[in-house]
Image (cartoon, rainbow, N blue to C red):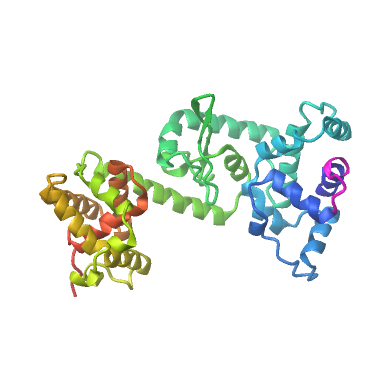
Amino acid sequence: MEFKEFFSMMKNRISDGADVPYFFRDLVAMITDVTEEEWATPKDPSSKLTKENTIRSYAKRGLSKKFAQSIVYRLSPEMFIESLNTRPHAAIALLAGDYRSYDPSATSDNIAHKLAYCFIDIIQRAAGLVPKDELERQKLMQQAHELKIKFGDYLRDEAENVCAFPGCSNSLMVADNGKATPVFEVSLIDKTKEPKIDNLLAMCPQCHATYAIDDSKKILKELQGIKKILVAHKQSMKLLDGMPLEKGIIGVIRKIKNMKEKDLLDPSLDPKDIREKLDPDENLALYRTVKNYVDTYYVTLKEIITSADKRGEIDYDEVQDQMKAIYKRLKKANKSNVEIFNEISEKVHKVSLQEDIYCQIVVAYFIAKCEVFDAITE
């Protein structure tokens, strides 16, 4: 089935008289988690059509490749099925009747499922992704099943239960009836290479299914980059496993969270120049982030920690030694400054279970205190 036929059939049964542009938007919203603001639907460069005319042209001649590519990794058959099943039963029955000329097994009970995957097939083909033949598809399914058994738990943990495909972020765990169930697949990154652990990623089922028929070198490169980041993060976490961090830091972070602007002490009382530790020309984003935290919180945080130490709520010397030890271990592993900042912040987060932003403020403080990062030498 082509899109113009699919669109005509759907509009005839469930549009409630809406015009073509309105119903087109509704149909795309049903099958994706993409907001209209995100749509990559610029004017057609060959005809200079307005947006509304472009949408009308899609209904007549099919989806453009560019538009299809912009949504192909954001497809959600579940959303489409759920939405379609809320329509009047009579409309569902008519759709089933219409679709029987393409699939005689269509019924009112299964038509939502069939139309969802028909629509996905249309979008994938429009995007230039050619579905595998049945034999190849079964072979890939068997391979994915075997890889999931062998590497699934490790890869899901590596991805921290979030789909590793860029821009997706779907959870790989679904809670249902009080039970958490893993919902994911294992995908080959480079399909021309062996299915080894460094060539595999955990993805949500939809991204896995789409990437299985996508040979884009651009996406391959993105996935290889993501894998490197995930591997580096897991290595860093392993390096820091077992390294203690004074739990008194939790109370310090809570005080930061409850702080009001009037509570901040004058930073000029103890100014810090972090250029001695971080070169803005090497990583401006990290430099500005740390500088902002230090300029805003350093003097106040110093007072909070010193007071907590006097009251016996935290062992300040021990925290300093621990921070320095954590930094040295990461530095010895040749981690970049950004990785070190992020991993120490993550360590503080795991100990305190507080939000990342407050953990980063604490790490910035210890950068200014010279426990994290060495002074830059000329």
Question: Number of callouts in the render?
Answer: 0
Instruction: Find the magenta span and give its range.
Output: 12-19
Answer left or right for 225 relative to 81: left
**Residue closest to the eye, 228 or 311:** 311
Residue in the image at 45% along x and 53% along y: 225
Residue in the image at 19% along x and 59% along y: 302
Answer left or right for 246 relative to 109: left
Residue in the image at 65% along x and 41% along y: 76
Residue in the image at 75% along x and 39% along y: 118
Q: In the orientation shown, which residue stands out farthest toward the bottom? A: 378
Q: How far across and how far down the image is residue 162, in percent?
A: 48, 42
Answer left or right for 348 relative to 91: left
| Image height of 41 relative to 80, above or below | below
Answer whether residue 14 is magenta in the image: yes
Answer whether residue 26 is magenta in the image: no
| Image height of 287 relative to 124, above or below | below
**Residue closest to the eye, 239 or 364:** 364
| Image height of 191 relative to 296, above or below | above
Q: Quadrant of the C terminus?
A: bottom left
Answer left or right for 161 relative to 362: right
Q: In the orientation shown, which residue stands out farthest toward the front? A: 262
Q: Quadrant of the N terminus?
A: top right
Answer whether residue 372 is visible to the viewer in this image.
no
Q: How far across and how far down the image is residue 96, in percent?
A: 84, 31
Answer whether residue 247 is visible to the viewer in this image.
yes
**Residue closest to the eye, 348 or 203:** 348
Q: How far across and how far down the image is residue 125, in percent?
A: 73, 48
What secondary structure do most residues of the magenta stretch adopt? loop
Q: How far across and how far down the image is residue 187, in percent?
A: 52, 40
